[in-house]
């Protein structure tokens, strides 16, 4: 089992920057991919950014160039630095991790980010 706890959600003005953090605990030595997903009300969860243990990253097209995902394997944390935030970035953001060898996924409880214009 892996436990994930997000922090850093809140109210942000459009155009500003904000950082989300996620701390993991439990079977952290088996964590492979970590990432951030977001969910709009009534919509399915969508991938925002992911990062492998070796640092390979992938971004959703709409955030590429504005968001930066980073990971500290020694502290078992993953962060999402969001710049030039827009109202359409308003969503609940979830931390994600999967473990080897099963690739079983785990989710945090989510943290709300609201961008005001």
Image (tube, rainbow, N blue to C red):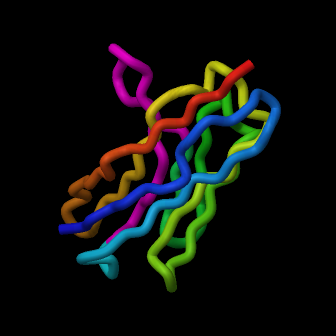
Query: Which quarter of the rendered picture does the C terminus lie within?
Result: top right
For residue 116, above or below residue 113: above
Q: Which residue is drawn at 76% across and 44% down?
A: 17
For residue 76, above or below residue 99: below
Which image quadrant is residue 99 in?
bottom left
Q: Residue at x 58, y 30 (%)?
A: 114
For residue 60, above or below residue 76: above
Q: In this view, does 103 lie to the left or right of 51?
A: left
Q: Is the magenta stretch mostly helix, strand or loop?
A: strand
**Magenta span covers which residues?**
31-48
Tell how many labels: 0
Q: Is residue 64 visible?
A: yes
Front-most of 36 and 53?
36
Q: In this view, does 19 lie to the left or right of 29?
A: right
For residue 95, above or below residue 86: below
Q: Where is residue 53 in the image (x, y as percent from the top left)?
A: 49, 70
Q: Residue at x 33, y 61 (%)?
A: 4
Query: Which quarter of the rendered picture does the N terminus lie within?
Result: bottom left
Which image quadrant is residue 34 in?
bottom left
Q: Position of residue 7 (x, y in %)?
A: 48, 56
Q: Is residue 85 left or right of residue 80?
A: right
């Amino acid at each position: 089992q892996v436990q994930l706890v997000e922090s850093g959600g809140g109210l942000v003005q459009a155009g500003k920057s904000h950082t989300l953090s996620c701390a993991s605990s439990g079977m952290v030595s088996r964590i492979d991919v970590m990432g951030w997903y977001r969910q709009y009300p009534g919509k399915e969860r969508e991938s925002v950014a992911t990062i492998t243990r070796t640092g390979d990253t992938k971004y959703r097209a709409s955030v590429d160039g504005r968001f930066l995902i980073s990971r500290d394997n020694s502290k078992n944390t993953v962060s999402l630095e969001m710049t030039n935030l827009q109202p359409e970035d308003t969503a609940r953001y979830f931390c994600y991790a999967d473990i080897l060898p099963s690739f079983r996924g785990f989710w945090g409880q989510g943290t709300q980010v609201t961008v005001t214009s």
